[in-house]
Image (spheres, helix red, strand yellow):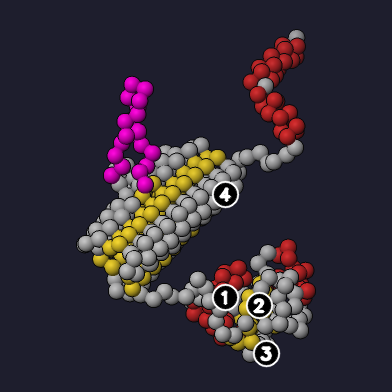
Amino acid sequence: MNQQTEPLTLLELVDRIKEKSNDTLLSTISANGGSAKIHSIAPLETAGFGEVAFLANSKYRDAARDSKATALVLTEEDKKTIWGEDEPERILVVTRNPYAWFALALQVMFPQVKAQPGIDARAVVEEGAEIDESATVEAGAVIRKGAKIGARCFIGANSVIGEGTVIGEDSHIYPNVNIYYGCKIGPRNIIHSGAVIGADGFGFAPLDRRYVKIPQIGAVETGEDVEIGANTCIDRGALLSTTIGDGTKIDDLVMIGHNCKVGNNVVLSGRTGLAGSTTIGDNVQAGGGSGFAGHLKVAAGSIIGGGAGVPGNIDKPDYYAGYIPAMPHKEFYNILSVIKRLPEIRRQLKRLSAKIDSLTEK
């Protein structure tokens, strides 16, 4: 849960953000604006006295110019586009990344309330489990034998931490999360409710029209600062572990199959699906509903559009898209009927091309 702080001066807020970002945002306040009292963050259209608004998308410049916010956060480019070389009669915070500034401002002004350390009497902690004294374990949680819960971790109500699983320090496991045996969750991970980490991968060997289950003896290992959304499933590896790199952010309802290797600082939006043995390079972004066929590699820095299907390797980083946008159903079925006839149309074109060539030769 997040709780609002007492009002801050704009200078105090900017200084806190500088500290959190190691001054990488290069934020500056317009003259005489530092003493303004700030009590909240608000959208451009509704912000008023005592509130900060931010302009992260240039198409909202008009709304930014007309905003009633006490302070407006924007880039130098947007400032010059809106007001030219004139200094507007309002308080501005100029920064190279207003969206990141906004995120950090919310962290400062609405920090997460820290839970009281301790193990609820209604939790089940098996013999041999190790729980740091600074950790919190809520009612109904089950910590299996050999599990290790790091410093300042939070284990939500009814979550199950499997045998031998390790949860890194400062990780937050929301209620009703299942982490199967032998998994390794890195420091400062956030795993939302309903997520299942380390279920068996979908592995079966065909034999005489039946399927023989392949024991999945790998695990799941996540790096530092990973966030996993609600109802997302990450399967354990067949022999080696399924791995998720540092800083990767995974949305709700994402499926990651066994033996996948997801790199650092990857973003996977909701309903993305990775079939087994997919390797995703660092800094890849995948839009909602995108799908990866498995046993393929995606180059670092690639962007996959929402709903796109990736059937094979992507060797060169680029923006990839491949879906038909929604359209009136009659128009869609007309297009579909043409697609079905493409092989026939191709043969007709070949025959016509041959006839034209023969006539030209004569």
Kindly identify the residue that appears in the image at 37 percent across and 22 percent down: 209
Q: Position of residue 34 (x, y in %)?
A: 63, 88
Instruction: Please tell me the numbered disc located at residue 288.
Output: 4
Instruction: Name the one closer to the observer, 96 or 192.
Output: 192
Dot 1 falls on a residue whose secondary structure is helix
- Could you tell me if the residues under marks 1 and 4 are in contact, i.e. CB atoms within 8 Å? no
Kindly identify the residue that appears in the image at 59 percent across and 72 percent down: 102
The answer to whether 215 appears left or right of 327 in the picture is left
Q: Quadrant of residue 328?
A: top right
N-term-proximal mark, 3 vs 2? 3
Instruction: Name the one closer to the observer, 29 or 1.
Output: 1
Q: Position of residue 18 (x, y in %)?
A: 52, 79
Which residue is under mark 1? Answer: 105
Q: Nearer the viewer, mark 4 or mark 3?
A: 4
Q: Amino acid at mark 1?
A: Ala
Which residue is under mark 3? Answer: 32
Residue lying farthest to the front in this orientation: 122
**Above or below for 294 versus 26:** above
Q: State whether residue 160 appears in this view.
A: yes
The answer to whether 316 appears left or right of 326 in the picture is left
Kindly identify the residue that appears in the image at 40 percent across and 63 percent down: 157
Q: Amino acid at mark 4?
A: Gly
Instruction: Name the one closer to the observer, 83 or 64.
Output: 64
Q: Quadrant of residue 358?
A: top right
Residues in magenta?
Answer: 199-217
Dot 2 falls on a residue whose secondary structure is strand
